[in-house]
Image (cartoon, coloured by chain):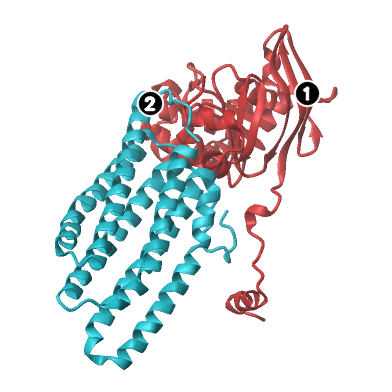
Amino acid sequence: METPEQTVLERLERGTAPPPEAELPPARTFEVKNMSIWYGEKRAIDNVTLDVAANAVTAIIGPSGCGKSTFLRALNRMHELTPKTRMEGTVLLHGEDLYATAVDPAIVRRRVGMVFQKSNPFPTMTIGENVVVGLRLNGVRNQRLLNERLEKSLRMAALWDEVKDDLHKPGTSLSGGQQQRLCIARALAVEPEVILMDEPCSALDPIATAKIEELIYELKTKYTIVTVTHNMQQAGRISDYTAFFYLGRLIEFGPTTKIFTNPSEKQTEDYITGRFG
Amino acid sequence: MIAAKHILGTFDEALGALRNNVLMMAGLTERSLERAMKGLFDRNDDLCATTIADDEEIDQLEKQIDKDGVDILLRFQPVASDLRRVVSAMKLSSNLERMADQATTIARRARKLNRHPALPEVDLIRPMYDHAMSMFKDSVDAFTREDVELGRAVVSRDEKLDDLNRSASDKLVERMGRDPGQLRGYLNLIFIGRCLERVGDHATNIAEDAVYAANAEDIRHPSLATAT
């Protein structure tokens, strides 16, 4: 059997290099085609087509009102909770149409979890109850399973060591950063396929932000993550792909390194360098 | 291309100050090279001494540009073309400082040569000097005007400078064999030729950085696969 060194030497002799990993097409979690969304008469998303890579972090950036949160919410049909909403186009999750008539939005939201800007633990519940509430609502009564999932989710959210002795205390007794990680644990407990994050660090201090960013980095090995952020540096740090939205349109989408060193569109360059408007 | 104004005025000011210092450093380096070579051609020790003394000011500017560049990275975390401009400015200053060092070396060697009778072989150095200086000026121009084509053109001119240096060195070595009494003088001229050849190398680096700043394209070492 040839050693790696031999392989490299042979390649050098032949003058061929192995294809870089980045060139291989990534597996897709979402395929969004020609998505348009209206709130009443107002068009919030305008004909967006975009593929979301699996086991990667995709950041959505853009000025306020550009439609990035609407786009994110449309990935788990959360936007439908707003009255007078209309949507056109298709969203495929692992090839399945999320908007097909037979699909139950509640199931979609279980498969595609969401973490919000402001941490929102249920105020009347303990830390432990907050984590497993989704499972209970889905009819899980087996205490052993609930306990297992509780610990696993809290460990994945990097919160277990900090709260394992306080599981009976109210969720609201935690700090802001801990509450946000509690919400991530709650999202993880139902074992989703994707995690959507809507500015998950915007209300947190730098240390709590760093912990969430570290967590996102670890979670992407198991989950596909799509996050909306106003923080350009954060998008640069945590994401593999970046999508820039403006006035409901997808202006540019590509690898984060490319977007932040040499964007193709002038509007993207102007926005990320702070020359907008 | 001149970028539109940044929303944050202080960022524009900081970028402007960084750029001005780079241009000032380029101007001083050009002057030092010219003075050192004039000191050689005109056998003028005063010009050589001035070149050597001026090096300190250029070193000071290099430190200032590095400090300002790091401050900008720290305070504004620039991205895209802004990031490339800052990184290129810092790399440029390092190349300019080393060019100025070559000017100092030339001035020192010229002073040694000036202590002895003039060597007509000094003329062998002139074409190299003209070529190296035109590469230098064009490389700084390419950076200033973000002119990608000019940057590429400078890079392609380095080979000719290498040829001129080889040819001059060969002739000087041949003279050494014929006239061993002037061996030191010929050796000093060979070293001056090598300094000019290095000026061309630094001009090439600056031109490559100019292309990167303007176009985000890394044209160094074309035989290697493009880094992604």
Q: How many numbered marks appear? A: 2
* Residue at the image position 63 percent from the left and 40 percent from the top: A254
Q: Amino acid at mark 2?
A: Ser
Chain painted in red in the figure: A
Is residue B70 in sight in this rendering?
no
Q: Left or right: where does residue B19 sit relative to residue A242?
A: left
Is residue A194 in sight in this rendering?
yes
- State the image coordinates of residue B34 (x, y, percent, origin top left): 29, 57
Quarter of the rendering containing residue B83: top left
* Residue at the image position 42 percent from the left and 33 percent from the top: A209
* Residue at the image position 54 percent from the left and 36 percent from the top: A150
- State the image coordinates of residue A155 (x, y, percent, origin top left): 49, 41
Name the chain under label 2.
A
Q: Name the secondary structure under disc 2.
A: loop
- State the image coordinates of residue B156 (x, y, percent, origin top left): 53, 61
Q: Residues within 10 Å of mark 2 (few under 14, many from 20)?
A: few
Residue position for label 2: A175
Residue position for label 1: A104
Quarter of the rendering containing residue B22: top left
Q: Left or right: where does residue B112 sit relative to residue B169?
A: left
Nearer the observer, B218 or A16? B218
Query: Do the residues at discs 2 and 1 belong to one chain?
Result: yes
Q: CA distance from mark 2 to mark 1?
A: 35 Å
- State the image coordinates of residue B145 (x, y, percent, origin top left): 46, 41
Nearer the observer, A219 or B94? B94
Colour for chain B in the figure: cyan
Q: Amino acid at mark 1?
A: Asp
Name the chain under label 1.
A
